[in-house]
């Protein structure tokens, strides 16, 4: 496990990179990225069994970013791990570029599945988990969804299916940041306890603080939570986490920082180091 | 037709352990033998078509050759976006096997009819669209599907479809089958309309016309070489399908001919652009929607008379 200080610095760097690229390319969804920084960083740097060397290996773990709109942080992490080059990352969100605002499957860059339309990832992940079971492979399949995403009925079709078949090699993470595109989840479609909902679908569910490194790692270390049940981590998070004026502010689902906001955001992140 | 599909797939799956058959809780008795013989290559997904297609994509991304089975509207309309994003966008080896094309579930009503499916599937990049017209075509397409690259839609009727070809005829996806190539007019039929077109052909022979008949079991990619040959050597072309006149075989043939500058007489014969307001079994509804031998014959004669006038 990474030292806390080291992890914190890494997460901070990724947030600053998100600000840089969003500012430079006028890209949106900063706040949706910020709520998953810790969980995604811990997953990629400390948990998932995949590396640039094993990206075509049949026994690799797989990850699907089902909330595809938060792909900028994934691209940044993939660059830091050597899946994609700095050059490629710099061709994010430009005409004739290499990376767009939702992920496109490019195995050579470590991107398993195209996403962007919500409610698809869990089914595809369940199919991958089923294939691994059929072939007696021990690899895990991770899928990260947003809370707004679980409004989609297809998520619950997949949840029933995975629960029924008991895919304990399937790890779903729901980024429960309590906000979706037009408001707070409690006002749009109240989700209540997601853990209870998944449990009633036959899953093993844990609620964690999605920004707490120790808690995230402790949770990963307990996988599978129960033999014969799919795993779901309800990652309670703060939308826009890390920059005070972006936190729990719907505007930052859409807004790109102007010159002043850009400076303010970076200053605040720098102070956290 | 679905019986021959199930039988053929079982035979193929015994030889290839990567074949996986998913059904959205449909196919009573059809897959009994398959599921008993190959329980590890069969999953009943329940009544959850969106999840079935997503899971199919996950399996195919992991190297499986996946077949998804349901009734046409539930298979290709309910989860259209999963087919688009998860299957076609990734160009996966997923075969969608839809039973009940056209009005074949007659008395079950509008929800169970599938007459917009070819149009929808044809619009998806990379999707191959087939509608076998008899068990021989169905078996051949099923066999070819195993090694076929990319998404494939096989549109089946209900069952009890007559055998039209002799078993020596060579069936390949993307190649139309010519039946009697000497007429001055050409009938191009697909799927369930081939037997009807055959009867129309016989009737027209009585009027001094003996049409060339084509079984166009593959609508996409269309056998344009064959269509071109027919357009050059025939006075008129008629497409006949149990599908909306919008976007199906007729549209595919028309698009091609128009762009290539073929100016022979042409008419699309299919289901009108409306929901069927009648209640009845398959044959009754086909009757009411104008897909009878007599009506098709009259439509053809009317076009030819107009052309001469």
Image (cartoon, helix red, strand yellow):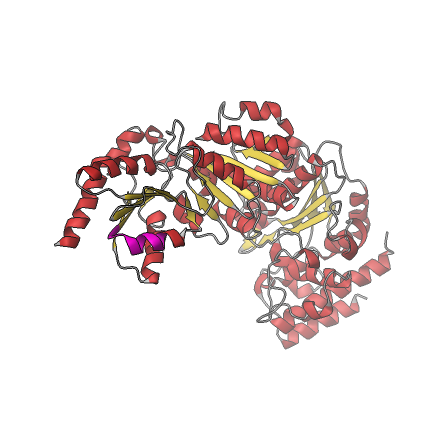
- Residue A133 shows in this picture: yes
The x and y percentages for residue B131 are 41, 40
**Vertical placement of B76 versus A45: above or below?**
above
- Is residue B235 found inside the magenta-colored segment of the image? yes
Type of secondary structure dominating the magenta stretch: helix
Please identify the residue farthest to the left as the structure is shown.
B309
- Residue placed most toward the observer, B229 or B22: B229
Q: Quadrant of residue B22?
A: top right
Check the picture and name the quadrant holding the C terminus of chain A: bottom right
The x and y percentages for residue B182 are 28, 46
Q: Residue at x 39, y 26 (%)?
A: B160
Q: Which residues are magenta?
A: B227-236
- Residue placed most toward the observer, A129 or B190: B190
- Residue A187 shows in this picture: no
**Vertical placement of B63 versus A90: above or below?**
above
- Is residue A172 found inside the magenta-colored segment of the image? no
Q: Quadrant of residue B216?
A: top left
């Amino acid at each position: 496990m990474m030292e806390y200080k080291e992890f914190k610095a890494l997460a901070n760097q990724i947030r600053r990179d998100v600000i840089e690229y969003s500012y430079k390319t006028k890209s949106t969804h900063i706040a949706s990225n910020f709520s998953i920084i810790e969980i995604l960083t811990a997953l990629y740097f400390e948990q998932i069994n995949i590396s640039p060397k094993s990206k075509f290996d049949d026994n690799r773990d797989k990850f699907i970013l089902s909330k595809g709109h938060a792909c900028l942080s994934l691209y940044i992490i993939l660059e830091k791990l050597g899946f994609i080059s700095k050059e490629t990352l710099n061709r994010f969100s430009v005409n004739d570029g290499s990376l767009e605002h939702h992920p496109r499957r490019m195995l050579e860059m470590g991107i398993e599945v195209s996403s962007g339309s919500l409610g698809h990832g869990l089914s595809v992940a369940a199919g991958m988990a089923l294939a691994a079971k059929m072939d007696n492979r021990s690899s895990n399949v991770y899928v990260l969804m947003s809370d707004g995403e679980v409004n989609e009925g297809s998520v619950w079709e997949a949840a029933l299916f995975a629960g029924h078949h008991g895919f304990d090699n399937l790890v779903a993470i729901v980024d429960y940041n309590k906000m979706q595109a037009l408001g707070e989840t409690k006002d749009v479609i109240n989700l209540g306890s997601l853990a209870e909902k998944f449990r009633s679908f036959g899953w093993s569910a844990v609620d964690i603080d999605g920004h707490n490194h120790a808690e995230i790692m402790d949770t990963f270390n307990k996988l599978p939570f129960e033999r014969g049940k799919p795993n779901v981590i309800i990652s309670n998070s703060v939308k826009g986490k890390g920059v005070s004026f972006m936190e729990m502010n719907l505007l930052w689902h859409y807004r790109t920082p102007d010159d002043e906001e850009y400076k303010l955001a970076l200053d605040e992140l720098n102070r956290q180091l | 037709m679905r019986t021959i599909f199930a039988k053929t797939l079982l035979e193929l799956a015994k030889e290839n352990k990567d074949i996986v058959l998913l059904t959205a809780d449909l196919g009573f008795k059809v897959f009994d033998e398959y599921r008993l013989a190959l329980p590890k290559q069969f999953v009943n997904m329940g009544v959850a078509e969106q999840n079935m297609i997503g899971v199919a994509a996950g399996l195919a991304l992991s190297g499986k050759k996946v077949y998804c089975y349901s009734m046409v509207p539930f298979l290709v309309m309910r989860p259209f976006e999963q087919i688009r994003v998860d299957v076609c966008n990734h160009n996966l080896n997923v075969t969608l096997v839809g039973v009940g094309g056209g009005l074949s579930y007659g008395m079950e009503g509008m929800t169970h009819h599938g007459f917009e499916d070819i149009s929808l599937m044809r619009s998806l990049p990379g999707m191959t669209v087939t509608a076998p017209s008899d068990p021989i075509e169905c078996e051949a397409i099923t066999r070819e599907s195993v090694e076929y690259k990319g998404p494939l839609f096989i549109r089946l009727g209900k069952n009890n479809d007559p055998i039209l070809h002799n078993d020596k005829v060579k069936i390949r996806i993307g190649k139309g089958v010519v039946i009697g190539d000497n007429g001055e007019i050409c009938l191009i039929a697909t799927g369930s309309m081939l037997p009807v077109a055959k009867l129309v052909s016989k009737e027209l022979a009585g009027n001094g016309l003996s049409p060339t008949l084509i079984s166009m079991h593959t609508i996409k990619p269309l056998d344009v070489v064959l269509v071109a040959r027919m357009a050059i050597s025939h006075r008129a072309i008629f497409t006949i399908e149990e599908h909306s006149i919008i976007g199906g075989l007729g549209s595919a043939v028309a698009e091609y001919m128009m762009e290539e500058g073929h100016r022979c007489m042409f008419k699309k014969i299919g289901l009108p652009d409306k929901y069927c307001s009648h209640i009845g079994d398959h044959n009754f509804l086909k009757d009411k929607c104008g897909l009878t031998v007599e009506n098709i014959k009259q439509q053809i004669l009317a076009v030819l008379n107009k052309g001469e006038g």
